Amino acid sequence: MATFLYEAMNSVGQSVKGEVEATSSDDAAAKVRAMGNFPTRIKEKSGARKGPARPTPAAGAGPAGGGRRTVGAVSKKLLTTFTRQLSTLIDAGLPILRSLRILEQQQKPGMLRVAIRLVAEDVEGGATLSEAMGRHPKAFDRLYTNMVRAGELGGVLDVILQRLADFMEKSQALKRKVIGAMIYPAAVITFAIGIVTLLMIFIVPKFNEIFKDMGEKLPALTRSLLDFSTWMKDIGWIVILAMPFALFFGARLLRTTQGGRMFLDRLKLSVPIFGIIVSKTAVARFTRTLGTLLTAGVPILEALQITRDTAGNEVYSRALARVHDGIREGETFADPLRQAKIVEPMVVNMIDVGEETGELDKMLTKIADTYDDEVETLVASMVSLMEPVMVIGLGLIVGFIVVSLFMPMVEMINSVQKQ
């Protein structure tokens, strides 16, 4: 028997520490869970061994000690494939270290291969898989490492990795659909702006010279067009070229502050049609994340903290923070979410039913699936609507240019005929 030091979260989300006697770290984790706590870290107390037992090194021991290299971000597609393959190998009965070595050899040279190698070295040095992955937060985020940790403690790592791969695939699929649907209108708008800019810089000035030779007083519509063409030829083209970069870097700068993030996210939600898509995407993301964590056995308060940090929208992050505080004070999940007014009543009611039936994780997953379908339908509808709108808009712009340029000529022809 040996004495193990543990850190855990109790049923109300408070951090607790203590000691427990056990034959191994897995036995210690089981005893901590039997106390009603969720263990977050377990290590053997040095010099406290009472019998033969396998030593369990503390986090950070072994080759992953201080100053160890960490890797950057990796491709989500490659990470999803790696997660599913690791789940298959573990389910087949292969040890974790052996599975990591096999997958490392299969990977092409790149950041993920380096990450797998470093994780394998840490595991070989005595760290758990979640601890080893936690040392590379850019490659394996909090959601990923907490899911892995829950799988380790529950003895169902292969199942959790499979669920994690499913979650990542669905999240990426939704993101691809939204981005793919926006490529066509973005391309059309870009070409339209380019064509109009070329007309203003190279074509309209030719008519300006003709009108000067005519010596006639120009209609207000024509004068406005010629003034705009002169501005475009002087500095307008610079403004148009600089605008995307100014917006991009301005948004990046605002994102560095909490108030700036809140402003940008509120602005996105207030845009007609697009705001609805952003809202439903955010709901699908946080419900799927939270449902996946709860299914893995992560306590609801810790799951809410992780979901809040990975929500991707400051408005929803703050609302989830209020839900977290409300649950800690004894409220239900649905009440503070209803007060936040960031989701539809249907979502609140489904969560309420999930709490009452004890199947909150399944209900959250159903909400995510429903909203994924709604986002896909909305995106398709928006693209279908934007096509005629863009054609009509471009037609009006070209029509305005043509009418403005030919009005003086029509007036001149009429005056000649009257003479």
Image (tube, rainbow, N blue to C red):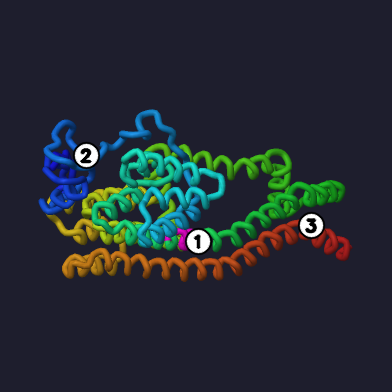
Magenta residues (range): 171-178
Left or right of residue 417: residue 101? left
Residue closer to the observer: 87 or 281: 87
Q: Amino acid at mark 2?
A: Lys
Mark 1 or 3, which is nearer the eye? Answer: 1
30 versus 159 height, above or below: above
Work out which quarter of the rendered image holds the N terminus and state it. Answer: top left
Q: Considering the numbered disc 2 on the image, is that residue within a helix, a strand or a loop? A: strand
Q: For residue 334: magenta? A: no
Q: Where residue 393 sits in the image (x, y, percent)? A: 62, 63
Amino acid at pointer 1: Val
Q: Is residue 115 visible?
A: yes
> Which residue lies under the disc numbered 2?
43
Number of numbered discs visible in the structure rendering: 3
Q: Earlier in the sequence, mark 1 or mark 3?
A: 1
Query: Measured from the top left, where is residue 265 in percent x and y?
Result: 40, 50
Q: Would you call the spot at circle 2 few (<14 residues within 10 Å), some (14-19), or many (20 or more)?
A: some
- Which residue is identified by label 1? 178
> Can you give x and y, in whole percent of width and height, for residue 72 in the image?
47, 40
Q: Residues within 10 Å of mark 3 (few under 14, many from 20)?
A: some
What's the mark number on residue 408? 3
Q: CA distance from mark 3 to mark 2?
A: 88 Å
Where, by quadrant of the figure, is residue 331 drawn?
bottom left
